[in-house]
């Protein structure tokens, strides 16, 4: 929270920011890493922030942060947003989209309050609302906004997200002009009348594709109704898939479409490699060899599940690496501490799941390693976007077993580019990958539901093909929440590991039969013993002449191959 119009309140709110909003942010922020280094886009466009017609006080803060040239997405989105109307924007991660929507939003707040008047005390009625799918991304956006409004009178920033005490958040949002929120906790506060969205004039939906994947479709509709009087909606998504367009038709009106990235957009500054592995142990050997590379500064290792992330981190620490795990089941305070350690360079290797890693923006991440493959091909693009940000070079390495070759084909089909296979001397795979033979299993490499069983993707569960909610309305910490759980409740990486012991030990757990008491109990000892010799012999001639009931067809018994060959 930032407050520049009352000395007493200013002092109080600055303490809150230091403890909650910026804790874990360190000295590095998304906006700075997206725009501090002039990318090829900014050199080509030659657009400076001075040319956008932004407020002088805002330009002063931008200049003090050391930024002069706008990236391509900023050069197109900022003028379009200032002109008014709804926007649909597709751009790559790390392209500067956070600043692209924050600059026009803050400019409008300055224009609406030129004298810097204080908001009505004790009321939470924001003018601008930014929705993010994960807590980490919400924290990043808040940190960027705080730096852009530093020293400006009458503009306050607040964060609403799960994992934080309700009481402190309710106090923090009073008088806030711009609120960055995750949908679940925001609706909780709306239901308790702690915040009113009737005065929202501008709504931003960041990473709309991820919103749907995490099951926020119904929440987005509910928020849409609560701020139906808004003037502008800005929606950002990695792709314009049919489900995104369906959502856009519901939330926007005659939206202008700005497409700066698509599924086949190449990450020219990210070197992508693939290593085939024979087994999990082989993947661990490959991982340790890669992490020993002298060019590696910091790395994010992606795991498929929470349990896998913990195991990999434990294995790496035992081998002497500075590694930590990060996943959605961790308390928010723990996640923030681990992110802070990563940003400060104390942690060299972060082993994370897809949900927890969303929003990580650390400039020193030189390598992204996919130890476990993503459930959905589009998540691959978001993963490798953790490196090579803002014109920097990065390396993305995928470790894959031959049984998952169908997933690799889906990723290559989605990105419209091949991932070159590499070999490390002494760690060559013994089996040769084959894309044509494969055993008749289900396509796309597995029998589970898309999205790891979380009803995500195209599988139903929601109006837009979405399902399980990740951040949900749990939240935690401060009590008074509906579930009493501060974890992300139903994310694609938040399911507990199942074991063979999870089934009931006996049949007693089944519902009782109402006629059970009328039958006499029968013990195993009451049954007459029957020996193998007491069974009548059956000759081969006793079978029906028509053959067995489920006999295989005579035209070959080979199962149909779903791999496309």
Image (cartoon, grey):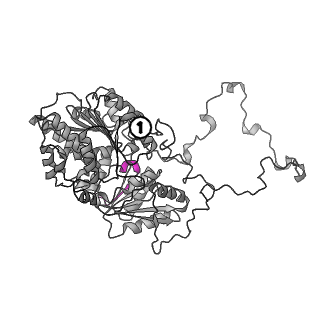
Tell me which residue sits at (58%, 40%) in the image.
Answer: 504
Q: Give the image location of residue 102, x and y in percent.
A: 24, 44
Q: Quadrant of the N terminus?
A: top left
Q: Is residue 351 magenta?
A: yes
Looking at the image, which is closer to me, 477 or 201? 201
Relative horizontal placement of residue 482, taking residue 435 as reference (left or right): left
Tell me which residue sits at (63%, 29%) in the image.
Answer: 512
Tell me the quarter of the picture where residue 505 sits. top right
Asked if one can make out residue 26 in the rendered structure from this viewpoint, the answer is yes
Residue extending furthest toward the bottom? 425
Tell me the quarter of the picture where residue 87 sits. top left
Q: Give the image location of residue 467, x and y in percent.
A: 46, 39
Tell me the quarter of the picture where residue 128 sits. top left
Against 282, residue 360 (above or below) is above
Tell me which residue sits at (43%, 55%) in the image.
Answer: 303
Mark 1 Cα-neighbour bin, 10 Å: few <14, some 14–19, many ≥20: some
Against 494, residue 113 (above or below) is above
Q: How many numbered circles are shown?
A: 1
Q: Quadrant of the C terminus?
A: bottom right
Tell me which residue sits at (47%, 64%) in the image.
Answer: 283
Tag 1 residue: 247
Q: Give the image location of residue 210, x and y in percent.
A: 40, 44
* Residue segment shown in magenta: 346-362
Q: Give the image location of residue 326, x and y in percent.
A: 36, 51
Looking at the image, which is closer to me, 332 or 445? 445
Looking at the image, which is closer to me, 462 or 262? 262
Q: Is residue 264 magenta?
A: no
Looking at the image, which is closer to me, 308 or 206? 206
Relative horizontal placement of residue 419, taking residue 201 as reference (left or right): right
Against 434, residue 245 (above or below) is above
Asked if one can make out residue 481 in the rendered structure from this viewpoint, the answer is no
């Amino acid at each position: 929270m930032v407050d520049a119009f009352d000395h007493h309140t200013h002092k109080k709110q600055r303490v809150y920011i230091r403890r909650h909003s910026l804790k874990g942010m360190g000295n590095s922020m998304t906006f700075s890493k997206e725009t501090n280094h002039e990318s090829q886009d900014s050199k080509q466009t030659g657009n400076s922030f001075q040319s956008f017609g932004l407020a002088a006080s805002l330009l002063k803060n931008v200049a003090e942060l050391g930024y002069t040239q706008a990236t391509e997405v900023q050069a197109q989105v900022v003028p379009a947003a200032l002109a008014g109307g709804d926007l649909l924007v597709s751009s790559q991660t790390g392209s500067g989209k956070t600043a692209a929507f924050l600059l026009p939003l803050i400019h409008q707040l300055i224009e609406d309050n030129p004298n810097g008047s204080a908001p009505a005390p004790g009321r939470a009625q924001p003018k601008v609302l930014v929705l993010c799918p994960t807590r980490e991304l919400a924290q990043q956006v808040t940190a960027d906004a705080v730096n852009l409004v530093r020293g400006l009178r009458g503009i306050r920033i607040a964060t609403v997200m799960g994992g934080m005490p309700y009481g402190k958040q309710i106090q923090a949002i009073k008088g806030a002009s711009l609120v960055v929120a995750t949908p679940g906790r925001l609706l909780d506060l709306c239901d308790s009348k702690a915040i009113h969205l009737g005065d929202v004039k501008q709504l931003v939906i960041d990473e709309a594709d991820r919103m749907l994947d995490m099951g926020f479709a119904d929440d987005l509709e509910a928020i849409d109704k609560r701020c139906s009087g808004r003037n502008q909606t800005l929606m950002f998504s990695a792709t314009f898939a049919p489900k995104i367009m369906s959502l856009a038709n519901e939330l926007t009106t005659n939206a202008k479409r700005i497409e700066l990235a698509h599924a086949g957009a190449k990450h020219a500054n990210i070197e992508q490699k693939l290593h085939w592995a024979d087994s999990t142990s082989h993947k661990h050997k490959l991982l340790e060899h890669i992490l020993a590379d002298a060019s590696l500064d910091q790395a994010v290792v992606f795991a498929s599940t929470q349990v896998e992330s913990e195991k990999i981190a434990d294995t790496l620490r035992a081998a002497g690496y500075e590694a930590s795990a990060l996943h959605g089941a961790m308390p928010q305070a723990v996640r923030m501490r681990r992110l802070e350690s990563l940003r400060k360079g104390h942690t060299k290797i972060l082993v994370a799941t897809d949900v927890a890693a969303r929003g990580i923006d650390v400039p020193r991440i030189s390598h992204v390693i996919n130890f476990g493959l993503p459930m959905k091909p589009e998540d691959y693009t978001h993963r490798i976007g953790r490196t090579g940000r803002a014109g920097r070079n990065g390396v993305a390495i995928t470790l894959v077993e031959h049984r998952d070759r169908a997933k690799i084909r889906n990723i290559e089909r989605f990105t419209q580019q091949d991932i070159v296979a590499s070999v490390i001397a002494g760690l060559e795979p013994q089996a040769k990958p084959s894309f044509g033979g494969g055993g008749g299993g289900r396509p796309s490499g597995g029998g589970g539901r898309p999205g790891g069983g979380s009803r995500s993707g195209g599988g139903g569960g929601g109006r837009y093909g979405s399902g399980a909610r990740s951040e949900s309305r749990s939240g935690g910490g401060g009590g008074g929440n509906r579930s009493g759980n501060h974890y992300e409740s139903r994310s694609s990486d938040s399911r507990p590991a199942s074991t063979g012991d999870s089934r009931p030990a006996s049949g007693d757990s089944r519902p009782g039969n109402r006629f059970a008491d009328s039958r006499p109990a029968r013990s195993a000892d009451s049954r007459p013993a029957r020996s193998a010799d007491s069974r009548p012999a059956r000759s081969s001639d006793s079978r029906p002449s028509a053959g067995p009931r489920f006999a295989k067809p005579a035209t070959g018994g080979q199962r149909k191959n779903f791999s496309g060959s």
